[in-house]
Image (cartoon, helix red, strand yellow):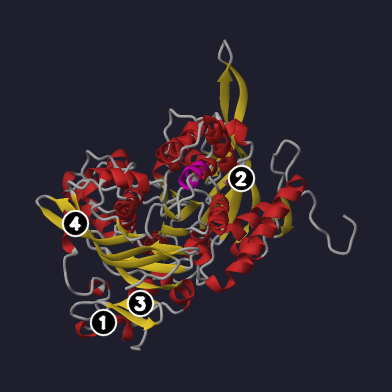
Amino acid sequence: MALIEIRDLKIHYPIRSGFFNRVTDHVLAVDGINFDIEEGETYGLIGESGSGKSTTGKAIVGLEKATSGQILYKGEDVTKPRNRKKLQYNRDVQMIFQDSLSSLNPKKRIKDIIAEPIRNFEHLAPADETKRVQELLDIVGMPADAMYKYPHEFSGGQRQRIGIARAVSTNPKLIVADEPVSALDLSVQAQVLNFMKEIQKEFNISYLFISHDLGVVKHMCRNMAIMTRGRFVEVGTREDIYQHPQHIYTQRLLSAIPKITPASRMIDKSNRKRVEALYQEESSKYYGPDGKVLDLKQVSPTHSVAIQDPVVEGGQS
Amino acid sequence: MDKPENQLLDIQHLHTAFRVGDDFYDAVEDVNLTLNRDEILAIVGESGSGKSTLATSVIGLHNLQNTKITGDILYNDLNLVGLNETLYNRIRGNDIGMIFQDPLAALNPLMRIGEQIGETLLYHTKLNKEERDHRVLELLGQVGIPNPVRVFKQYPHELSGGMRQRVVIAIAIACKPPILIADEPTTALDVTIQAQILDLLENIQQETHSGIILITHDLGVVAETADRVAVMYAGQIVEQGTVQAIFEHPLHPYTRSLLRSMPQADNDSDDLYVIEGTVPDLKHMQTDDCRFAARIPWIPASAHEAHPTMHEVEPGHFVRCTCYKTFHFNDEAEA
């Protein structure tokens, strides 16, 4: 059984307007998605801004209320508050945020920031707590004297590692990482990604890795989903998505990534133009009449795509 | 020295120093660069490397009370360093256009799009209201905004990020400046929008034959668009050359390390390459030694030069310091 299963998750925001401020419409931020995260796995969630990927992550940690659908943790639905408490869900599921500066309280010392989840869930004596914080700082490769400093005294990469130390302080099973490296420089990004992999191996943590950067997701995740307009357009393994993309949206996204090979840039560019033209031309085939992404159809045991009908080779479909 | 026919900008020994306390510290040190017509010159570097400071020095956006700029920035025999404000105001917008990273912050939220673009024309040209409006609509069309007539009357918050960046570009190119400086023009945008904006910049360049300085930290963007590249580290240019030279035969240890730490490669199970240590901050950059030496401690001190200078390895391909000759990664055998 998977560690966490998302079943037909929907998050709709009401739009109020008119004289009586009545609900006139809904924004379908997340509109019926399904996926599983296995223990110790990194699951990638890729999407452009406004696709609903962060909303999905927030709903899983409980910062956003699901309109309908289920989030099954160890087989029980944690959208119900009673189950959350019983399963110690809030302790087992933690989050790493994109902007490390705004996610750390500027008035608190690093020690208090990292100890906050510990103080919530465990009652340790002050000496034990200090020892635990020291251990955590050691895990993320920071000196012990960082404890009595404030967030502004650190660089972006160091702050992101403090955010990770806070997230792992309660020995979580799942960490939702919402764009954890997109604010970081290349060399620092490599440090943080390596480090996330390291603690994953050590503590058998699962990640939900939310990102718009296809290169980073390719490096981190074996299974992934591409999201747009609140729905999944393509779900599959790394090979399925990067080698055999089926949906035009995925193809367009992949062709838009700049390559670091200047020799082939004219070819890459014409390829991108071709896919873009195809996208404009054929998007009606891939989307419903109201612009809604179609339902996923399985094309191979690991690979599902939101298309009308799977292409059946040599037969009637 | 007579200057080549198509040279637009010639930067010689540029130093930009900021005041910290009572002392001045160089954020940009001894930069020599030229920009030609019809070319995209990319300046790559991580945050704090001085790439944006270099750009703002060219367009003169520093507060001279706290900044000391020395050296020469020659534009048509006119030295922009120490130029008085009145003359600089004539240059900015008219001869040098700037595209900023965050289009929402670069636009005035209280002004309609049409007015904002027209403002530049009002200042620099003698067009009347009707001619200006006509030109603004033409510009909106040129930067690929659908329905220019409607957008003309809209406010910045009504547009998406990509559309706003197009408006910023329209302002920058309104007076057809021969030099365009684009400071991280696509960093805040999605990849598909990024591709559109980069295409747009290339198209504009082909039409106007301008020279573009593209400042970015994204190596992919550089490889796709630039003609020449300058790599900056800790305020200095460490390597400079054509885009092919930099990506296919990178020499400086920093360039090589940077390219290796990209998660682009297909070695998924392996860890990414990490450059040891951190970028030195402004106060601690003041050494005459190779500034990258601390990040590659396994290279013996004898491999570095005492006062690293730029060496021309091949025509047009420059590398700072001699450490590139013996550099090898710490997990490789000695070269």
Task: Tell me the residue that label 3 is attached to.
Answer: B318
Question: Which quadrant holds residue B250?
Answer: bottom left
Same subunit under labels 1 and 3?
Answer: yes
Q: Position of residue B120 (x, y in %)?
A: 44, 39
Q: Secondary structure at mark 4?
A: helix
CB under 8 Å between callouts 2 and 3?
A: no
Chain for mark 3?
Answer: B
First to last magenta residue range: B167-173
Q: Position of residue B167 (x, y in %)?
A: 51, 41
Q: Residues within 10 Å of mark 3 (few under 14, many from 20)?
A: many
Chain for mark 4?
Answer: A
Question: Which quadrant holds residue A155?
Answer: bottom left
Could you say which disc has been placed on residue A144 in the image? 4
Q: Residue furthest top?
A: A19
What residue do we see at 22% from left, 55% from top? Answer: A134
Same subunit under labels 4 and 1?
Answer: no
Chain for mark 2?
Answer: A
Q: CA distance from mark 2 to mark 1?
A: 48 Å
Mark nearer the viewer, 4 or 2: 2
**Horizontal placement of A195 versus A239: left or right?**
left
Q: What amino acid is found at the position of numbered circle 4 in the picture?
A: Ala
Q: CA distance from mark 1 to mark 3?
A: 21 Å
Mark nearer the viewer, 1 or 3: 3
Question: Which quadrant holds residue B303?
Answer: bottom left
Same subunit under labels 4 and 2?
Answer: yes
Q: Tell me if I can see residue B205 in this picture.
A: yes
Q: CA distance from mark 2 to mark 3?
A: 45 Å
**Horizontal placement of B92 versus A297: left or right?**
left
Q: What amino acid is found at the position of numbered circle 3 in the picture?
A: Phe
Q: Is residue B156 above or below residue B143?
A: above
